[in-house]
Amino acid sequence: MDRTAVQRIKSRLDFVELAQRYLELRPNGERWSGPCPFHQETKPSFHVNPGQGFFYCFGCQASGDVIDFYARINGLDFKQALGQLAKETGVDLDFGPVSPKERQELEQRDAALRMAALAAEHFRHNLAAPGGAPARDYLLRRGVSPEMLDVFQVGWSRADWHGLEEFLQNQGFTRDQAVDCGLLVRNDRGKVYDRFRGRIMFPIHDLTGRVIAFGGRAIDSEEPKYINSSESPIYTKGQHLYGMHQARKAIVRDKRALLTEGYLDVIALHQYGFSGAVGVLGTALTPEQVKRLGGFCSRVDLLFDGDQAGQRAALRAAEMFLAQGLACHVATLPQGEDVDSLLHAQGPEALRAVLEAGRDGLDFSVRTVSGTYAPREIMDWVRRFLDNVAADDLRGFYLPRLAAGLGMSEAELRRGRPSRPMQPAPQAVQPGANRPSTNQLGAPRLTARDRQLLAFAVSCPEYRPELAASGLDAVLEDAWARTLWDKLRALDTSDASDVSVVAHKAHADASGYDFSVLEEPERRLCYQLLAEAPQRDQAERAAFWAEVREFMTKNQFKKRQQEMLQALRDAQAQGDQQRVSTLLQAYQDLAMEA
């Protein structure tokens, strides 16, 4: 990887602007802070430091640079994130030698993204063409506005077995590529044809707005009513939510989301002002979807049909959101109504009344279970629900509320639930074994002195040459700390021969805070130390260095004294009087230096 190109990408990105695409941030001195998008919270424990080019969450310890942030929040690996940001910033990337398999995967992904984007435009063209009249009439009857058609890029697939196939071939793609992308189908006899025919087309976007899949709805009695894209190099079922790209800003702003079913229901909600609405895609709600939505908000309103199937789906969804610690409310639509029909017939006020009448998710779950389950099934449900709650404190929060809702005492409920299995005890460490304990960052628990010295090396990179000249490697006590120090020094010398120039330049251009080549535990510790370090101006940093230098000088002097005293004891034990006299004189000379 060309680190120069990576630095150019970072220098052309405004970290705060990019982060604000996904969450609300407010200035806090030289940093910006807000609720963390990577775990459930309401406190502003998430910080972005644009000057030093990193983010850190004091709640969940998520950390990294702008590329790490972009990758994590969009569910990408590092190379994928780097490639997208390179295109955004106009930087040419050279990933260096890659294996044939990696190259093939990159080419397949790139081709799939281009085909999906072209297919979306093809379907939109079909909708506007004379042949799209039946689809336009259907959408008009359903009350979809022209604005929403544009926002959600709604299109139409002609009732043609080879229309999209021919279009993609004319664009330079092969049948095999289009089959791999999920746009075409190959049957058991090897015949290839369009997957979507005669259907309203709803593109599915990732968080960056790129088309990655499609859902197709029939406009007549054809079955199945819905067809969705198969998995492909760019789309994994159960990881995305319909409308998330369009709803993200509203969800982040309000810390609240509205989850429903159906493409047209989501579009209708946005059309009537409920801009935080998203939809489950095809299959039942998945843990991945829950975690993704929970990273952006603290409350989810579930809006499902009032029939038995809708209530079962609402119960399962409520369980999953509650297990993650999110506030959850369940609103039930009147019998015979769906979101789309209610909005178009009675307007947004009717839907607001439905939402306001919704019940707390735990209360809804308990009432539903106690009203429809047998006693044994109720206890089974309680055990399953509590086992899915990962946090002990959250489990303790739910237990008394479950007991009260079910008319039981908390003690009875605890007796009816087996204790969680004991984790196997760690094997005893043999005396003398070099197995330092680790913290939650995966790094050894360093001594306070090593941590303070590394904190200075990380937060004041312009002084790393002076630290090296003063012998920091000899002062650090832990081998892991010394290894990290060696790597930090290597960062300074990897791009230029004049180390002092590089290091003193680091404070100004943030290159001294680039830890992308370190191992993950090392990276996390560096970002944590940066986040914990107070902001200092140049004079304060110089004063800090004077303190560190004085400490290191005294430490080295004390170490020399200890080594000389030990040598003196050894000489006395051996009866070497000449060496004893020499060492005594040297010790006195050393004392004079103090």
Image (cartoon, rainbow, N blue to C red):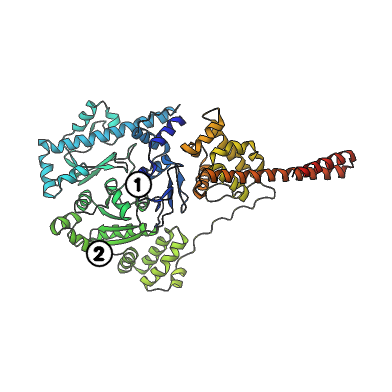
The earlier-in-sequence mark between 2 and 1 is: 1
Residue occupied by mark 2: 356
Quarter of the image where one finds residue 329: bottom left
Q: Do the residues labelled 2 and 1 touch (CB within 8 Å)?
A: no
- Return the x and y of residue 143 as percentages of the image width and height: 13, 50
Separation of marks 2 and 1 at Cα, in angstroms:
30 Å
Q: What residue type is labelled 1?
A: Gln
Q: Is disc 1 surrounded by few (<14), some (14 to 19) or many (20+) residues within 10 Å?
A: some
Q: Residue at x 39, y 61 (%)?
A: 385
Q: In this view, does 161 lie above or below 410?
A: above
Of residues 506 and 306, the one nearer the viewer is 506
- Find numbered disc 1 in the image and state the secondary structure of the residue it sits on: loop
Residue 278 in view here? yes
- Find numbered disc 2 in the image and state the secondary structure of the residue it sits on: helix
- Return the x and y of residue 302 as percentages of the image width and height: 28, 58
Residue occupied by mark 1: 20
Disc tally is 2
